[in-house]
Amino acid sequence: MSLIIKIIAVAIVHLLFFASYPETGPSGNYYLAVSLLVWSVFIIFVNTCAKLVKLVSGALGLAVNLAAFALMGLAIAATMPQRDHTSVLEKLRARRYPDGDTLRSGMLRFGVKLDADIKTNMKGLDSEVNKAIKKLKED
């Protein structure tokens, strides 16, 4: 796996956590920026180590990369700030998973309006279905 893909994966993991548990309070954006920077540097270091380990065994190199990403996910879940002062890790242990409303509000933080996108796509789908029905009636 190339280094660029790994750094993009770091960003995706962070975005998934922040979209799933958006109630981070005022320090959430700072946490996101610092955490992205720290974990990107860590992954660069691990990438160098994994390349050296891959010389011995390809499977062991993959295991090192997977362990690094597992550690990152655990650390984010344990340290990400929440307004209710309950860590994401504790919420996951208590089986308090995000629901649809939480995901919608989390995606709004990044400028994605899921409801509007779905409505727009449904209108386009309806018009295509109507065109197909008209075409079938003409034949």
Image (cartoon, rainbow, N blue to C red):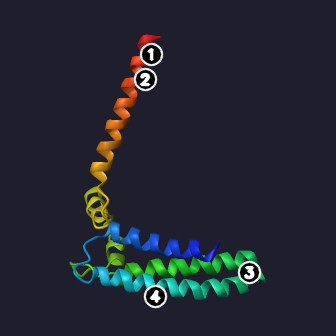
Q: Amino acid at mark 4?
A: Val
Question: Above or below — where is 79 with respect to 138?
Answer: below
Q: Which mark is residue 38?
A: 4
Q: x, y (%) of residue 45?
A: 59, 88
Q: Are marks 4 and 3 in contact (CB under 8 Å)?
A: no
Q: Amino acid at mark 2?
A: Ala
- Does residue 91 appear left or right of residue 138 in this picture? left
As helix, strand or loop, the secondary structure at mark 2 comes to: helix
Q: Amino acid at mark 3?
A: Lys
State how far apart marks 4 and 1 are (Cα).
58 Å
Seen from the viewer's position, the closer of residues 110 and 76 is: 110
State how far apart marks 2 and 4 are (Cα).
52 Å
As helix, strand or loop, the secondary structure at mark 3 comes to: helix
Mark closer to the chain start, 2 or 4:
4
Label 4 crowd bin: few (<14), some (14–19), many (20+), radius 10 Å = few
Please identify, in this view, whether the residue under mark 1 or under mark 3 is nearer the observer.
1
Mark closer to the chain start, 4 or 1:
4
Q: Residue tagged by mark 1?
A: 136
Q: Residue tagged by mark 3?
A: 54
Q: Residue at position x 38%, y 78% from top? A: 77
Mark closer to the chain start, 3 or 2:
3
State how far apart marks 1 and 2 are (Cα).
6 Å
Quarter of the image where one finds residue 132: top left
